[in-house]
Amino acid sequence: MEHGTFGDPSSATFSLTDEDHTLANAVRFTLNQDPRVSFCGYSIPHPSDARVNIRVQTTGESAREVFKDSLKDLMFMCQHVRSTFKKSVDDFKMSNPVVAMEIDPNNKED
């Protein structure tokens, strides 16, 4: 949900439900990397409330568009991390094949 002023599209507060510090801090980070952003921050209204408010103020661009661009950037970063991790795991598995273990069914160690 977006909370903003009709007269100034360069600032808005976005309220995300069922989210916490994990997503909010990542979005804040990507927003701060954007030169169009003059201020961004987030707050959690109450610890028992699963909601995050993210405030965005820009240098003149639409806060909504900058926020959407930031979410896309974060999505690409996550995809890059996932594919890099998967490739590393696959490379490890190829260089370290699983060796069959011999298990003696008659060995009764307690």
Image (tube, rainbow, N blue to C red):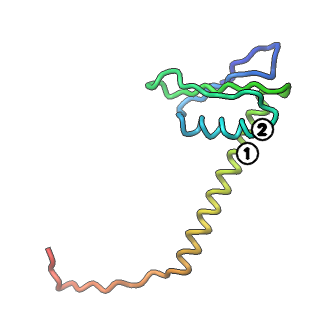
Residue located 84% across and 28% down the image: 61
Look at the numbered disc 1 and give the secondary structure of its residue: helix
> For numbered disc 2, what is the local secondary structure?
loop
Q: Is residue 76 above or below residue 64?
A: below
Among the two numbered marks 2 and 1 on one chain, the one whose residue lies closer to the N terminus: 2
Q: The C terminus appears in which quarter of the rendering?
A: bottom left
* Residue picked out by circle 1: 73
Q: Dot 1, how many residues are within 10 Å of its Cα: few (below 14), some (14-19), or many (20+)?
A: some
Residue 6: percent from left, percent from top: 79, 14
The residue sitting at 62% across, 40% down in the picture is 26
Quadrant the N terminus occupies: top right
Residue drawn at 81 percent across, 16 percent down: 8
Q: Amino acid at mark 2?
A: Asp
CA separation in Å, label 2 and label 1: 10 Å
Does 66 sit above or below residue 81?
above
Res. 53 mark: none
Quarter of the rendering containing residue 95: bottom right
Question: In the image, is 58 to the left or to the right of 14?
Answer: right
Of the numbered discs in the image, which one, if any, rests on residue 34?
2
Mark 2 touches mark 1? (CB < 8 Å): yes
Identified by mark 1, the residue type is: Asp
| Residue 89 place in picture, x, y as percent | 55, 69
The mark closer to the camera, 2 or 1, is 2
Q: Quadrant of residue 52?
A: top right
